[in-house]
Amino acid sequence: ALPARGLDLVVQLRHETLWNRFDGQALLPSVAGSDVPSARNSSTDLRLGLSWQAAAPVTVRAGVATYFRPPAFSELFGNDGFSVANPKLAPETGNTRDIGLVAELDHGWPRWPALSNLLGPARLEWAYFDNDADDMILFVQTGARVAKPLNVGRSRSRGHEFDLSLGLGRAAGLTLAYTVQTATNLSPYPDYHDKELPGRPDQELHATFTYGRPGWDAAWTLTHRTAFYLDQANNPVRRVPAHSIHGLRLSLASSAKGTRLDLELDNLGNEQYADEYGFPVPGRAIYMTISVDSPARP
């Protein structure tokens, strides 16, 4: 904490070193030694974070940092049937910068008594981010229309993030998470330079409305994404259109102790679209689960 009232500064220095004993001959087909990732990677990264209680209930936050992300095991060797592994991946490094505001109302709305009966605790957060990355790792659809993790080179992501959590009366609540960004490929290759990063929509929204009473509760969910590309060249053929997915969930607890019914309805609008791997997502689906807990025997 700094002498100024309500001002906190956090300094973090992190050093990370990774070793591996990976032998490319263990793969099928085998990988030549020249294509095997380095047996050692290390990075020393600094993070500075600043928090200032400007005026209750508003807090100003800002941070700058460098980061290091080695490829995950699943990216190097694969663990599913939806993508191809890439043992040649290099670690991703970069710089992050962000500034934002947080407003919290944990004790109602004392300045607006008329709202106190309608609205409960609330939290609103906004942040602007400006991030640069080298050797960014992204799943990209290749010429064979198969998703593969690749180092896409230099990139920049700028945008805004908004998060809202709001109580509505005594039984309902609303949460929103909204991101608007520009994610640009800065690779030196002319076919990719200044194109949109694959799998990164310009806008993404997640919303959940909940309502609960004794014995039952329900929720409505919405996920909306604008269109995005699956490849680095931004081929229109490999472009996932904008889509909005609605879902409903209903849970009923029986008067019989330990009995519960859960009903879920996904993709109510039967939207037809592909995920970040290029695979079609299931259409409208209904799931029902009945749970019964038998009493423990003495």
Image (cartoon, rainbow, N blue to C red):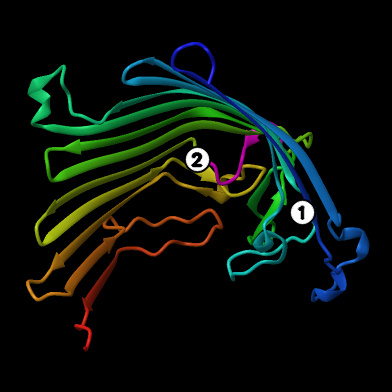
Q: Which of labels 1 and 2 is toward the front?
A: 1
| Disc 1 to disc 2: CB gap under 8 Å | no
Q: Is residue 133 visible?
A: no
Point 85% across, 53% down: residue:
40
Helix, strand, or loop for circle 2?
loop
**Which residue is nearer to you in this view: 78 or 94?**
94
Secondary structure mainly formed by the magenta segment:
loop
**Which residue is nearer to you in this view: 70 or 131?**
70
**Horizontal side, residue 233 vs residue 23: left or right:** left
List x then y, in percent, for residue 243: 38, 47
Q: Is residue 45 above or below residue 259?
A: above
**Which residue is nearer to you in this view: 292 or 8?**
8
The three-letter code of the residue at mark 1 reads Leu
The three-letter code of the residue at mark 2 reads Pro
List x then y, in percent, for residue 64: 62, 26
Point 22% across, 88% down: residue:
297
Name the residue tied to disc 1.
89
The part of the chain drawn in magenta is 192-200
Name the residue tied to disc 2.
201
Task: Answer whether residue 193 is magenta in the image.
Answer: yes
Point 86% across, 68% down: residue:
31
Q: Is residue 217 above or below residue 286?
A: above
Quadrant of the frame with the C terminus? bottom left
Helix, strand, or loop for circle 1?
loop
Q: In terms of image quadrants, where is residue 263?
A: bottom left
Q: Is residue 157 above or below residue 275?
A: above
